[in-house]
Amino acid sequence: MKNFAKSVLNYFAAFNETRFRFSRKLPYEWSGDSFTLDFSVFPGFQTALLAAVATGNPLSFEVEKQQYTVAIDHDAFITSLKAEFSEQLNQDFLQNLINENFERLKEALSEEDEEELHPRAFKEGLREYNLTFRRRLLQLLTEAQDQKIKELQNEFEFHSVPPSSFNPQREVQSLYDDLKKLCKNFDAAETYVTTVVEHVTNQSFGYIIFDLHPILRSYIQLIGTQSLYVFFHEIEKEAQRYLLFAVEIGIRDGEDRIIIETPRDLLMLNTPGINNFEFDSVLTTPRACRFTDAAISLSAIERFLQAKYTVSESFMFTPHFRPLVRDDLPSIKYRVGLQAVKEEDRRILDYSELITSLETGSGRKFIDMVSRYVEGNVKNTSDEVQDTYNRNYPRKSAERIVPQRLTVPLSLNEKQKRILTAVENGKNEIIVVDGPPSLVQSVDLRHVY
């Protein structure tokens, strides 16, 4: 009976989410916009999240500053900088800038003594040199960041990248300000480049371009009060990108750490999302499970997909698994990240939580109600409610038109008064009402589950 009760809850969850039209757009999908935060560049954190689910533990993480980071390679960047000074920003380049400025000044100020123009040309040449350095440094930092991302993509085969926590303009401006101070101590070009090279190459260029802590802080400020989930993996075809399973989380900014926790013992299985792609058979796993049952429930989904793609290796808890592909089928890829759900029907979550509560014994009352209904032990109170209604609201009486016994400060029609009469009957545990609240079209006064 417990499994049948689960099936009933699954039925209502599927109806609310899909209306049994599998072409319907589902709310639980990767949006790929600012409401999505991929953890792709943090493989260690992704693995920790997967491991928690695999071992049946609710998610509970504290992310500190610089705990999960990606940095530019210092030595490689210094090498590229030295090459820049050797090939482009060298002594000859600076001298050419000084000479060009001297010629321009001489042409513009032909009456002035050339000896007086040299200091001005020198000063302007240094200024242009420093500006060129600033532009090239910003380009080099951008290229180094792109190169690091490409290296990670080649290693872990991901496509979506989170926003960077690095502000290269700030670092470039700091070095540019240093060069402006250096200029004040030079009146000849011969040693300036050597001094600049020495100063710049002694800096630390192991810049952190991705730090999960500030990235999470920016993200939670952006999403506000949206429902937030950790999405696991992606099943994708054309414009549809659904997850395989998800965990609802709460996330708090604890100043020096970001706290991520699950508010309930509930793992959501995206059975509707998988069935949305219309495989040759239907996945029948429940819509949700407890964390302790995660391995078993996800194993059932995995076996279903393994059969469709003719693969034997496990992938559900395998970090960076090879994509599952086959002609005319959606591709399945490794992906772990946060997703804010903008238009969520919370009833789906309620049904999912009811499903999991059946395993703990707390859903005994619901199982008993389903059992009584299936076994035909539900008393039909329609006649009893009708008799009570006739007594309370006699025909051709003022009570039927303007009832005094009701404390509801509204004008109610006949069907609405019948609903209140049914509610007052203690034998009616559940009443199903069809129609908009303002005009009830039909009422079923039986126990309906």
Image (cartoon, rainbow, N blue to C red):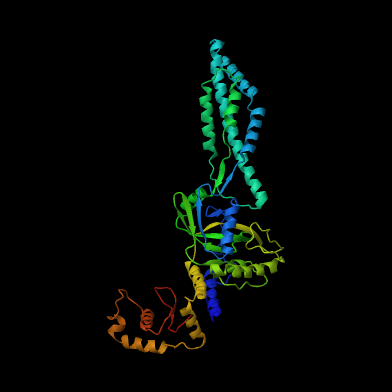
In the depicted structure, whether residue 432 falls above or below residue 337:
below
At a point 59% along the width and 38% down the height, the residue shown is 141
Q: Is residue 130 visible?
A: yes
Instruction: Give how far across and how far down residue 188 sits, in percent.
Output: 57, 17
At a point 56% along the width and 19% down the height, the residue shown is 122
Where on the picture, by quarter, is residue 237? bottom right
Instruction: Give how far across and how far down residue 376 sits, in percent.
Output: 50, 88
Is residue 35 or residue 208 the one in the foreground?
208
In the depicted structure, whether residue 318 falls above or below residue 198:
below
Instruction: Give how far across and how far down residue 85 sits, in percent.
Output: 64, 28
- State left or right for residue 291 relative to residue 334: left
Count of residue discs: 0
- State left or right for residue 15 relative to residue 237: left
- State left or right for residue 364 relative to residue 395: right
Where, quadrant-wise, is the N terminus in this rendering?
Answer: bottom right
Is residue 310 or residue 391 the one in the foreground?
310
Where on the picture, by quarter, is residue 315? bottom right
Is residue 112 or residue 185 the one in the foreground?
185
Q: Is residue 393 visible?
A: no
Instruction: Give how far across and how far down residue 196 sits, in percent.
Output: 58, 26
